[in-house]
Image (tube, rainbow, N blue to C red):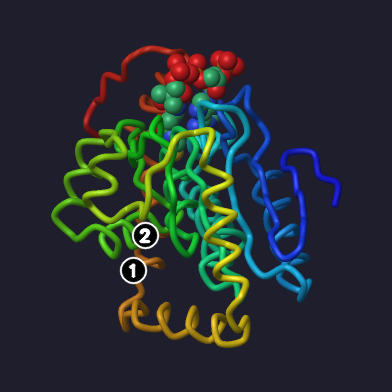
Amino acid sequence: MQFNNILVDSQQPIALVTINRPNKLNALNRDTIQELNEAFTLLETDKKVKVIILTGSGDKAFVAGADISEFADFSVEEGGKLAAKGQELLFDFVENLATPVVAAVNGFALGGGLELAMACHFRVASHNARMGLPEVSLGVIPGYGGTQRLPQLIGKGRAMELIMTAGMIDVDRALNYGLVNHVVSQEELIGFCKKLAGKISNNSTVAISHAIKAVNAGFKNTSNGYAAEIEAFGACFGTADFKEGTTAFLEKRKADFPGA
Ligand code: COA
């Protein structure tokens, strides 16, 4: 499989997918999301691939978020569409994939990066990883499922604090919160994930795909939090705070929010 923004190394029964934009800390632009959708679609149909490991290239970042330069001038409607499309193509798609997906979090997992790691079926991190949802520091909210999956994984109060402070947590806290299952050295990360994947691949893939469905079904509420997130995310694009937050990031200065 040949892509421009990701690498796919399929050594059955394990496939390693690497997001490969190290100069942008693997930020998720439109093309990367599309390519990940295509790669996951192909890997899911390959019955010889029993586990997928997802990681970021380089030693600094898993994914440092959605690509801010792509959406800084979006309107309310475009903002809503960005979240809806991303959730459909990648985040919901990965969560509901029949093939297990393990996130190997090798560095910063921020914003869309943490949201992507949380959409995976579980997470292993290296010691240098840092995780957070910094969106409110940009005048926007998490739009790729973060307002839903973070409280599911770590509890409502911890999620509220992390979202409101826009802060980053280290791996000790992430492990303590249950956000990641294991912490290993960066050198060991992929090998450790491959060992786990090896154990998974000895089991029934059919039964595992049913287990994924059953576990996910327990988190589907009657009121759709994901839809509420998309609407609220879009609304942020009509605020002066959003314009200031994203402009300040791109101009490499601290935001001074007008509060409107
Ligand atoms: N979108 C677009 N570009 C991004 C990015 C993102 N989410 N995250 C990092 N980059 C780019 C930087 O603009 C920079 O590009 P440049 O070299 O062309 O100027 C490059 O990646 C390296 O990042 P830099 O900020 O110089 O690295 P750092 O080590 O000083 O800081 C972070 C690392 C992760 C703390 C910082 O990059 C950051 O805060 N990123 C944004 C995180 C975020 O808010 N994500 C949520 C988006 S909704």
Name which residue lies at 24% across and 57% down.
154
Q: Secondary structure at mark 2?
A: helix
The reply, left or right, for residue 24 in relation to residue 49 is left
Q: Nearer the viewer, residue 102 or 235?
A: 102
Q: Position of residue 209 (x, y in %)?
A: 57, 81
User: Is 109 in front, or is 28?
Assistant: 109
| Residue 66 in view here | yes
153 shown above or below 65? below
Using a 10 Å C-alpha cutoff, classify the residue at mark 2 as few (fewer than 14 neighbours), some (14 to 19) or many (20 or more): many
* Relative depth, front residue between 163 and 107: 107
- Taking 249 as reference, is 4 left or right? right
Image vertical order of residue 156 relative to residue 44, above or below: above
Residue 234 position (above or below residue 212): above
Can you say whether 148 is above or below 251 in the image? below
Mark 1–mark 2 distance (CA, rounded to whole Å): 6 Å
Q: Specify whether 76 is left or right of 24.
A: left
User: Splitting the image into 4 quarters, where does residue 45 fall?
Assistant: bottom right
Residue density around tag 1, few if under 14, some if 14–19, many if 20 or more, within 10 Å: some
- Tell me the number on the disc at residue 229: 2
Look at 56% across and 87% down and name the residue there: 207
State the quadrant of the C terminus.
top left
On residue 225, the disc is: 1
Q: Position of residue 26 (x, y in %)?
A: 59, 34
